[in-house]
Image (cartoon, rainbow, N blue to C red):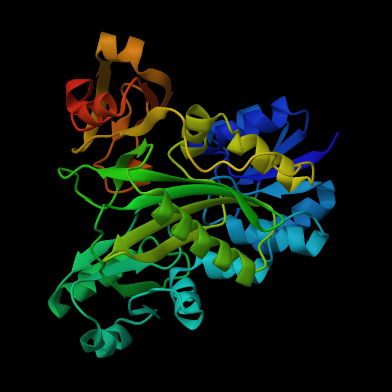
Amino acid sequence: MKKVLLLGGAYSQIPSIKKAKELGYYTITCDYLPDNPGHKYADEYYNVSTTDKEAVLELAQKLKIDGIVAYASDPAAPTAAYVAEKMGLAGHPYKSVEILSNKDLFRKFLKENGFNTLRANGFDNLEEAKKDWDNFKKPVMVKPVDSSGSKGITKINDISELENAFNYALTFSRAKRIVIEEYIEADNGQILGEGFSYNGSLDVCLFIRHKFDSKAENPYTPEGGILPIDLSENIQESIRNDIQKVLNILNMKTGAYNFEIRINNEKIYLMEIAPRNGGNMIPQLIKQATGFDMVEATIKSAVGDVKKIDKQVFYPSNCCSYYVIHSNSNGVLKKITVDIDFKNNNLVKFYQFVNEGDNVSTFTGAHGAIGIMILKFETKDEMLEKMDNMEKYVKVIVE
């Protein structure tokens, strides 16, 4: 029985642990949170931080693992690549994953290789950031270089706002480093993508339209996404070509990716290519839309069991979406109510992370999710109408 080391046991990572067990692999989880719910599904658990590369390597060597997975985790992706490279396991080049996992390094990479990009610079010192302030077009986004889930992000226009934005971003950065980047308006809203490459070839790649809650404390945290997206096939092909160019330059191998893209005046801007599966149950949405099992492919690729995908997957055949259950106020969750017709006709799966009686916080990032719904619809019009009016169908009551 092959052994798989899965980095993390959060709610969002449970599907990967269950899938590995279902596929017949011996499952081992590790992180610094022994109470994380995913660990109970694994054969073994070790209290080792997923960002401590050397400690995870020592554990992996001791256990003689056959594969390592950083499912839906930006912080763990470099660790997985590092361990795989040191042990000769399947995985992407460590240096390439470092570039993709750090926003300032990725912006530099894009500029050096001729991709569309706006001015960006990384800082670990506020005074240095202030000195560079006048070189940016305003507004700018201030972000941690190494966080995910829209955590720690602020949009600012004036230098008087920089100190608060800088310090806020630092609270979400393990490296204690931030990036300032010029803001770019998106002609068609922000585009999310999910992909999978086999020996560097992007054989699976779908794009999803992000939806945002204008009432949320952090308006840059997506509350959902819809498929199919209203982008021409030509534009989608151009985006895929740009992503493939990145994979080629970085010598990426076999594995999953999560993308964020913006289009402005018909120019494509690659905002993020994360070398891991998406959060918010995006792989489950992809399976609902196309039948392709991203989780299975990810687990199998880690142990070298995945085979060439017979048919490229680019366009979904079903109308479906994900929706993040969230609260716009702090308090205690009293209950979640779901319209009965909506539940019977549209709800495919409800992943609930927070129980009644537990504390909830305002929706400032993915960590504020109460749960995720995977939804299906008969028509695109039905999907758009219901996703624009989710407060009619799903109510979160907080006291």
Q: Is residue 329 left or right of residue 176?
A: left
Q: Position of residue 117 (x, y in %)?
A: 37, 74
Q: Tell me the residue at 73%/47% (across/down).
A: 302
120 left or right, relative to 217 = right
User: Up-down: is 366 above or below 169?
Assistant: above
Tell me residue 387's x, y (percent).
25, 31
Residue, far front: 234
Occupied quadrant, residue 332: top left
Q: Up-down: is 360 above or below 80?
A: above
The residue that appears at 69% across and 53% down in the rendered structure is: 254
Rendered position, 342 above or below 56: above
The answer, for residue 142, to whether it is visible in the render is yes
Query: Taking 113 as reference, is 92 left or right?
Result: right
Work out whether residue 42 can be spotted. Answer: no
Number of marks in the rendered image? 0
Q: Depth check: 44 or 328 in front?
A: 328
Q: Quadrant of the C terminus?
A: top left
Indicate the position of residue 36 as horizontal and vertical percent values: 53, 36
| Residue 380 vs residue 35, the one in the foreground | 380
Occupied quadrant, residue 345:
top left
The residue that appears at 24% across and 13% down in the rendered structure is 339
What residue is rendered at 61% in x and 37% in y? 295
